Every structure is written in C-alpha cells, then in structure tokens.
Image: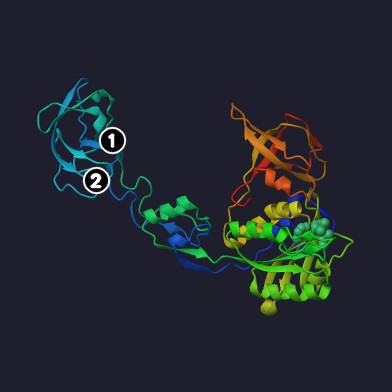
Amino acid sequence: MILSCFELGEGMLSVEETLEALATMMPPPVVTHLVSLAAAGNRILAVDAVSPINVPQNTNAAMDGITLAWPDDAPAGDMYVDVVGDVLAGTRLTTSLAPGQAVRITTGALLPAGADTVVMSEQLADVGIHGRVRVERPDRVRRGQNVRQAGEDIARGQRALGAGTRLRPQHLGLLASLGYAEVEVFRPLRVAVFSTGDEVSAPGESLPPAGIYDTNRFSLQGLLSRLGCEVIDLGILQDDLDSMRTSLVAAAHEADMVMTSGGVSVGQADWVKPALTAIGELGLWQIAMRPGRPLAFGRIHQTGGVTVPFFGLPGNPVAVMVTFLQFVQPMLRRMQGEHDWQPSRFTALAAEPLKSREGRVDYHRGVYTSDEAGQLWVRTTGRQGSGILSSMVAANCLIEIGDGCAAVEAGALVTIQPFGDLT
Ligand code: AMP
Ligand code: MG
C-alpha cells in the first residue's frame, strides 16, 4: 500500500517511493478558458478536439499532371490519352470524365468525377497534336496513385487531439487545418518562488565577503516558464522563522504552488520545517539519490479548506534542478492537466567508468553522442559536485544510475534522460 505523503516519517525513501507518494497528491483542478490559436502554444488542451470536417475535405491531386480513370487494359508500351480540359487548385470541374479522357490537374485540385489516378507531368510527353499526350511507361502506373483521399489525414467526427495534450507547433497547425480559431486550454499555473539564506545575495548587488549570488531563483524561473507556468518571483527570504511563515502564507494566497530552495538540510538554519508545520503540513524526506537528498513536500492551509502544495527544494544549484526535473515537474504537469507525461529515457553505453553506490540513484550530468553505427555513448561532464552548475551547462542529459548498481564499468549500458523541452 502506498502511504500518503505525510505518513512517511523521516526515514530514507527511494526515488520510486517518493514519486509514488507525490502521485497520491491530487491538487484541485485548474480552471479552463478559451484562447486564440495563436496564443495557445505550450498550453494544455482541456477538451478533446474533434474534427468538424474531413481533412483533406475532398479527394485531390498530390502532384501536377493529368488525372483520369486508370483503365484495366492499359498497354505495356506507350499509351495515348485525350486531354479535354484543366482543373486548378481551388476550382471544381462539374462534368464527369468519360473513359479514356483526362484533364490536366495541379497539386491540391479536386479530382473530377470519373477520375481515380494522377500521372505526373514528368511521365507525359507532348506528341504535337493539340489535346493529346503520351503516357510513358504506363506499366509503372498504379490505379489510385498520387491521389490524396478525402479524410485520409483526419475523418469528420474523429478525435484529432485528446484533452491533456501539450500544444506544440504541429498541434497548432493541425487544429488550424480543422478550422479551429480558438481552443479551450487550462489556465497557466501560478508558481511562487523564494530563495532562502542569509548568505544569498541578488545578482546586481555587491557580493558580501561571505555571500553567494542567488542562482536557484533564476534556474527555477527558467524551468517554470518553459513549462508554461507564470512565475511569482518573491525574492530572497532571510533564515528567520517569523518572516518565513508570513511570507509563505501570503504567497499561498496568490499561487497554485509555492516553492523554496535551501533551508531543508538538517542541523543548520533550517526554518522551512517549523514554518510549514505552523501553517500546514510537511513531510521532510531524505531521498536515496545524489544530488538532492533532502526534499520537503507539504501543503499550506488556506481559509475555506483550500490547500496549496509546497516544495522545499535543496539549496545546492544542481540538486535544485535535478529534484525539480524528477519530482516537481511531474506534479506540475499533472496539475496543468497533462496526464500521460513520462520523462523520456534512452539507453547508452558508458564511455568511461561512472561512480555510483548501491542503495541510491545517482544522476550524473552527461554528454551523449551517437557513433557511425548509430550507437549512443555517454560520458560525464567531469566533476559532479551538487554545487557545480557548470556541469549542467556542459551536459545534454542526466545519466540515471539505478539504486541496484554499485558501479558502472566502461562499455556498460546505462539509462540517460536527455535534456528535453525544459533544460
Ligand atoms: P542550505 O540547504 O540552505 O544549507 O543550502 C545548501 C547549499 O546551497 C549552501 O551552500 C547554500 O549556500 C547554497 N544555496 C542555497 N540557496 C542558494 C541559492 N539560491 N543560490 C545558490 N546557492 C544556494
Ligand atoms: Mg540555507
């Protein structure tokens, strides 16, 4: 049985157990609204898109040439055909073709009644007699060739796209081809983001001798906006219980999710836990993974019984990105209405030995390439400390070494998560 998020205690959890616990959380559904197709990119379709028409609407030519009813007794050698007219894209021939007759046709033009085949211009020769052409190599013609059948892409009444689809450029084109000018999509999620730490300074300020610049707010904002969320940037919180408590409650009023980084490691100025316990519920988890071991997940209670999900991510910049990609991303996608999402995973051969440890999942930053035979290989970006953000910059994937694996030798198969639409 899967325990609810807050019954897990503070023991060590596997990555899988963490994902299962988070999947039991069902945040309230997001409202939907109509937007113009031009504004619908990267939004999530809230209802199925059913086609009101056949696409293509009519059976039409896929090539320039002539169209005719292809005879059963076509000769093997040269064949002569009478061309009795023209039909251009956007026009319609009202008369029906008699056997042996053809018309010139351009790509996209409707096949007239009686025609079933298009012979392309390159296969036709002028014979010097007006209205007559020679079809070369008629033995190569197949009845029905170079013709697009009405409804062959999408038939009228067919579900063209399912609710929950994230709209990429090809989806927008497809919806336009069905005549949709507007679509119903989920409202963008609003996510409030804080950094925490007395040592953390905003870029643009002078750096105190014992300070570091705030990295996480910016990488998180980038991840969130690529995911299609609206970011509420709430700056840097000092390591102070009272201000944290009030700021988190205020953030939950405006946001669908609240996120902090830092302050969840044990033993230091860790205010996230007491702050959350005072205003909601919190699970503080040690996850058997590297980087990203400490992670807090909770709910901030609002008046009226509403609860707003909360993530307390680790402080180290690589750990922030890795835990976002593994745990926050699936929840945000579910909340956005994108139900069938899974991270893409491939296998590659390790180009060098990789350090790992049994009982924990390691996420190395890697660079994968393909050799001449099409085989994927992956190497690491070098030093893998959870504060070394240049390892993310150099990488094009995460190498995911499962918790059953004590070490990876050169040439062994490993799983990679290629950087996708977010990173
Ligand atoms: P903490 O869990 O708060 O102790 O943070 C762990 C490490 O991450 C410490 O070295 C922090 O200085 C660093 N860190 C925390 N927040 C940030 C941030 N917003 N940007 C860059 N580094 C941070
Ligand atoms: Mg801190």
- Whether residue 9 is visible to the viewer of this picture, yes or no, is no
Report the Cα–Cα distance between label 1 and label 2.
14 Å
Q: Position of residue 248 (x, y in %)?
A: 73, 72
Circle nearer the N terminus (1, 2): 2
Marks 1 and 2 close (CB-CB < 8 Å): no
Q: Residue at point 47% right, 62% down? A: 39
Q: Quadrant of the N terminus?
A: bottom right
Q: Is residue 379 left or right of residue 337?
A: right
Mark 1 sits near ligand 1, with its Cβ under 8 Å away: no
Q: Nearer the viewer, residue 242 or 200?
A: 200
Residue that badge 2 annotates: 110
- Residue 286 screen position, x and y as percent: 82, 55
Q: Amino acid at mark 1?
A: Gly
What's the residue type where badge 2 is placed?
Leu
Residue ID for mark 1: 144
Quarter of the displayed picture in which ligand 2 can be seen: bottom right
Position of residue 158 measured from the top left corner of the image (x, y, whole percent): 40, 53
At x 15%, y 43%, the residue is 96
* For residue 41, side relative to residue 390 (left or right): left
User: Which residue extends farthest right?
Assistant: 267
Residue extending farthest to the front is 206
The foreground one among 52 and 316 is 316
Camera sees residue 168: yes
